[in-house]
Amino acid sequence: MTRLTKKDVPFEWSEECEQAFLELKKRLTTAPVLALPEPGKELTVYTDASGTGLGCVLMQEGRPVAYLSRRLRPHEHNYPVHDLELAAVVFALKAWRHYLYGEKFVLYTDHQSLRYIFTQKDLNMRQRRWLELLKDYDFTSEYHPGKANVVADALSRCEVDIDPETRHMGLLEMASVMSMSDLSVMQDLQICGQMRVPTVSLERVSECQRADGLYGRFSGLARDPECTDWAETSDGCLRHRGRLWVPAVSEIRDSILEDAHRSRYTVHPGRTKMYHDLRRLFWWRG
């Protein structure tokens, strides 16, 4: 149905549109899969890690509130099992801080040693850093056998990829949606409804990054667990402090500037606002 709202598209109500409309009505009039958390009731967090990713589930009284998963970053493949399981816990606490901070909750993990993380004496620097974050929360840690932790386990092993339609977003819009975590779901939907086909894709950016002479240096920093400035995200692109690194390729930089000026998301910003928006989303030398 979304296609019918586009400019110069004739309004033809097909059988496919009818089925989509009926499905939409059904979903709007039936109970949602995810429950809204109720204040005062205990929350439960399940986490798991595998050789491919991290998976987490937030529940309340047996009903799922939120799901979370992501692929392992390149340097995380070198983590020992203990650190991977702890990384899944940190991943969940950071993502659901607005639900968990100041609340008592139970954390279930299938790694026994994490139950005693606060009393362990021999911790590496990474574990010490994560331990400081854990101390901000009021929770009890319980052991949950891996074969019983089926949902979080499945999420940690699920291959996550960028939706094919998402690959057709403009670079500015893609970077905005991927980095602006403060946007609500409705705002995301409104933005996605205004996307346009770009002249270059994130795949092209990743390709140009790898061809750039600085790639070896920057990718090395992204793999360094002690370096927090650089990271390689699931789309295969390097980012500097959360901003997409744009290599010295005029094709890409020109596309970004054009998107910034013409995109409906930016509503034709002034020069100063346009500069600050770009600076927040992208990074390049010079």
Image: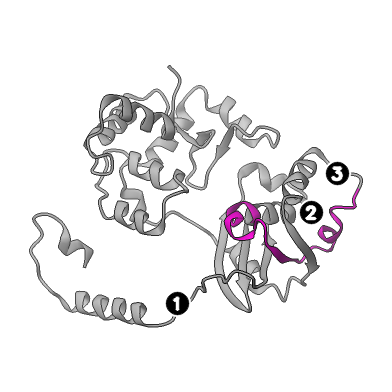
Residue at 31% from the left image edge and 38% from the top image edge: 200
Residue at 67% from the left image edge and 57% from the top image edge: 102
Which residue is disc 3 drawn over?
123
In this rendered view, identify the residue nearer to me: 140 or 126: 140
* Quadrant in which residue 280 is drawn: top left
From this view, report whether residue 47 is shown above or below residue 127: below
The CA distance from mark 2 to mark 1 is: 35 Å
* Quadrant in which residue 20 is drawn: bottom left
The CA distance from mark 3 to mark 1 is: 42 Å
Which residue is disc 1 drawn over?
32
Q: Residue 71: in sight, yes or no?
A: no
Which residue is disc 2 drawn over?
82
From this view, report whether residue 236 is shown above or below residue 187: above
- How crowded pointer 1 is (Cα within 10 Å; few <14, some 14-19, many 20+) is rated as few
Percent x, y for residue 60?
A: 62, 74
Regarding mark 2 in the picture, which secondary structure is present there? helix
- Foreground: disc 2 or disc 1: 1
- How crowded pointer 2 is (Cα within 10 Å; few <14, some 14-19, many 20+) is rated as some
- Foreground: disc 3 or disc 1: 1
Q: Residue 249: in sight, yes or no?
A: yes
Q: Magenta segment: does it hold 104?
A: yes
Query: Which region of the structure is painted magenta?
Result: 93-120
